[in-house]
Image: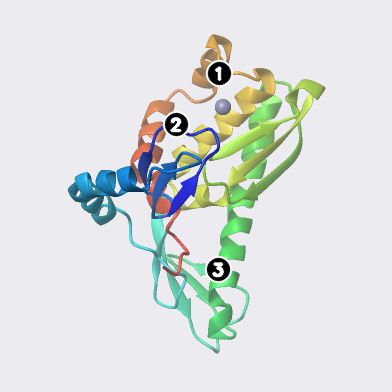
């Protein structure tokens, strides 16, 4: 994938482990020959990056997906009830097989919200703040975001993919966003409050750095 950026001065080569793309950024004009040289020179490096990318994990019958620090097997059979039902380490669901990916995704999103919304409201109450809205989306670059805290009540959004991670990882992201209800920046006050709300945050941050990219490959067909 090559793209020209109006502000780019140098040619940049990037291997993106989140969406599995190799990107070359070029200045508005020219640079193609240099880009080819750059690609050639970094061929081994690129091959190593691509080999290290996680494998796509589509939501198909029999797939074993990460969930809440453990795994769930997608147990589909036409005769099972359509609505996904968690039974131990299986997620049972029925209905047309081509509806499986969308139905599993919907179930994971609602599980993410059912977990993180009460946790967020509970923790926000501890710091005397209100939360107007908690929702889940599918952000690429951030696990959570907090807006509107200056008005006294914030809107917090999370990546639904956090439900795939162990619970302490979610607690850390929740604590991070709730701390933003009090401090809009990442200053010392913010970090002091975050440490109070989640004393073991370092391990969770490490986990996301190591495994975060792989979560973006869950539910992907290719
Ligand atoms: Zn932040």
Give the numbered dot on residue 104.
3
The reply to whether the C-beta atoms of the residues labelled 1 and 3 are less than 8 Å apart is no
Q: How is the image coloured?
A: rainbow
Instruction: Specify the quadrant that holds the N terminus.
Output: bottom left
Location of mark 1 (residue): 186
How packed mark 1 is, by other alpha carbons closer than 10 Å (few <14, some 14-19, many 20 or more), is few
Instruction: Specify the quadrant that holds the C terminus.
Output: bottom left
Q: Ligand 1: does it lie within 8 Å of the C-beta at label 1?
A: yes
Q: Is residue 49 left or right of residue 84?
A: left
Residue 141's place in the image compared with 178, above or below, is: below
Q: Ligand 1 is found in which quarter of the picture?
A: top right
Q: Residue at x 77, y 21 (%)?
A: 150
Indicate which label's residue lies in the foreground, 3 or 2: 2
Residue 72's place in the image compared with 67, above or below, is: below
Location of mark 2 (residue): 9
In space, the residues marked 1 and 3 are separated at their CA atoms by 35 Å
Picture coordinates of residue 81 (x, y %)? 60, 81
Q: Residue at x 62, y 38 (%)?
A: 119
In space, the residues marked 2 and 1 are separated at their CA atoms by 30 Å
The reply to whether the C-beta atoms of the residues labelled 3 and 2 are less than 8 Å apart is no
How packed mark 2 is, by other alpha carbons closer than 10 Å (few <14, some 14-19, many 20 or more), is few
How packed mark 3 is, by other alpha carbons closer than 10 Å (few <14, some 14-19, many 20 or more), is many
What secondary structure is found at the residue carrying circle 3? helix
Indicate which label's residue lies in the foreground, 2 or 1: 2
Residue 200's place in the image compared with 94, above or below, is: above
Q: Going by the picture, which residue comes out furthest to the front?
A: 30
Q: Going by the picture, which residue comes out furthest to the top?
A: 188
Picture coordinates of residue 151 (x, y %)? 81, 23
What secondary structure is found at the residue carrying circle 2? loop
What secondary structure is found at the residue carrying circle 1? loop
Which is more toward the observer, 84 or 59?
59
Which is more toward the observer, 140 or 112?
140
């Amino acid at each position: 994938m090559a793209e020209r950026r109006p502000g780019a001065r140098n040619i940049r080569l990037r291997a993106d482990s989140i969406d599995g793309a190799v990107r070359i950024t070029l200045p508005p004009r020219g640079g193609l020959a240099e880009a080819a040289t750059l690609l050639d020179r970094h061929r081994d490096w690129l091959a190593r990056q691509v080999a290290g990318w996680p494998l796509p994990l589509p939501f198909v019958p029999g797939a074993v997906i990460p969930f809440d620090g453990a795994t769930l097997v997608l147990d589909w059979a036409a005769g099972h009830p359509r609505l996904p039902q968690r039974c131990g380490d299986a997620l049972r669901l029925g209905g047309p097989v081509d509806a499986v990916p969308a139905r599993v995704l919907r179930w994971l999103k609602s599980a993410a919200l059912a977990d993180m919304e009460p946790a967020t409201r509970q923790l926000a109450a501890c710091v005397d703040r209100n939360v107007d809205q908690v929702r889940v989306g599918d952000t690429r670059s951030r696990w959570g975001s907090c807006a509107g805290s200056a008005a006294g009540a914030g809107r917090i959004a999370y990546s639904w993919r956090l439900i795939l991670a162990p619970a302490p990882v979610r607690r850390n992201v929740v604590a991070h966003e709730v701390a933003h209800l009090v401090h809009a920046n990442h200053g010392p006050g913010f970090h002091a409050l975050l440490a109070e709300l989640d004393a073991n945050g370092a391990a969770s941050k490490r986990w996301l750095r190591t495994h975060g990219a792989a979560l973006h490959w869950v539910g992907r067909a290719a």
